[in-house]
Image (spheres, rainbow, N blue to C red):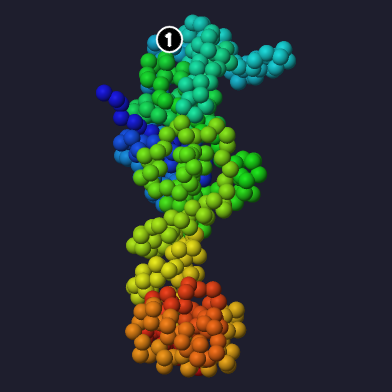
Amino acid sequence: MSTQVVTRFAPSPTGYLHIGGARTALFNWLYARGRGGKFLLRIEDTDRERSTPEATAAILKGMEWLGLDHDGEVISQFERADRHAEVANQLLAEGKAYKCFATQEEIQAFRDEARAAGKSTHYRSPWREAAEDSHPDAPYVVRIKAPQEGSTVIKDEVQGDVTIRNDQLDDMILLRSDGTPVYMLAVVVDDHDMGVTHVIRGDDHLNNAARQMMIYDAMGWDVPVWGHIPLIHGGDGKKLSKRHGALGVEEYQAMGYPAAGMRNYLARLGWSHGDDEFFTDAQAQEWFGMNGIGKSPARFDFKKLENLCGQHMAATDDAAVLHELEAFLAATGEEALTDAQNVVLRKALYCTKTGAKTFPQLIEKSRFALASRPIDVEEKAAKHLDDVSRGILKELTPHLQNVSWTRDELEATANQFAEAQGMKFGKLAGPLRAALAGRAATPSVFDMMLVLGQDETLARLTDAAG
């Protein structure tokens, strides 16, 4: 019987959810969800000085916005410190770890000598094979006995086999002199106890894998499947930083990118499935595998992100777009839509969500539907409402009072009127946009009329005609 796939995302709560962390979470989520497995969340909050509840809340909020649901409770690494120490003490009792009484000064002197002699600065403790009772009351750390010969092979699904000579591994500290466990031990114990089968994380952790495998081997535990993914770079090929733009997931939410577009883009950032660019969550879950992840750093490209977001906005059903728009307004502190605005906006979405790549763009395209009389006319549009144009609108209004309110009828009526005035319809479109929306750039005049309805359309035209 095959083991159920279990993946995890394990961020440190020292700030916002970084876009690179979000992609790592997404890859783990896709891998587990596509295989009927579990996706777990662990907060690595052992660094008490830097970890904050606010940062934990920001991570959870970012994941909620991205739609990355996790299974079970959120695990706190700090709360499991006793369990981590228990494993270190077990290794100590089994002779696979030892107490090291070396002082910081002794370790520094060793490193200085080794550096001067051009040798490895990995500390070789004289206490590895010593009798422990010679320093019964002195402070000590617990170190694992690293293998000293041969090599360790990290079998990595992304990087391939990575071989590290064991003489490059030091006797890593497991417990500090105050008895607290180190991060490297905590990660392994947590992953084992949580049943994690696949560890998908940034390739900056690749070297850690060899050191963590020492603990797996010493405890006789199964080593998880490794997948170390390249980091994300900016468009200039350098590591993603503030100068490239937004780094935190909440910044992208505040800019109004739809979550589905963000998921699609992040999935394509370093992973591919043939030439597919646009895909649904269901497709991503079905297709995602570590064999599709490239070995080179991916480059963040805002144009591609916007393009995919536009496609997702157009493909998402109206109720879901409205729901996410309301969440966007709440997240950015904007005023919520009234019930009346909700109703008319839902009617307008068929002609406003296509071409909009972000929620601010959607709001701008839908401005005609959200506005109430009297319509505020922007300067660019006001140029289309000179005396001549207002006179034309005044003459047009009676022609629209008795037509059946369908697109065909409205187009026919407007075109006939323009022809009778000796002008092309295009000449009429500017004043109509200004009157109905107060904007020079809007959806089609006839779409706006259909959304607004006959009474509101005629009222706006009458207002504008003066």
Can see residue 121? yes
Residue at the location (54% across, 80% down)?
Answer: 426
Q: Residue at x 59, y 18 (%)?
A: 103
Q: Position of residue 348 (x, y in %)?
A: 40, 71
Quadrant containing the N terminus in the rendered view: top left
Give the x, y percent position of residue 35: 33, 35
| Residue at which label 1 appears | 95
In terms of depth relative to the viewer, which is nearer, 135 or 339? 339
Q: Position of residue 16 (x, y in %)?
A: 50, 47
For the point 49% across and 79% down, which residue is it? 437
Q: Nearer the viewer, residue 314 or 422?
A: 422
Residue 138 visible in the displayed image = no
In the figure, residue 94 lies in which quadrant? top left
Residue closer to the observer: 217 or 177: 217
| Crowd band around label 1 with a 10 angstrom C-alpha radius: few (<14), some (14–19), many (20+) | some
Q: How many marks?
A: 1
Q: Residue 204, relative to residue 51: is it above or below? A: above
Image coords of residue 236 (percent x, y): 66, 44
Residue type at tag 1: Gly
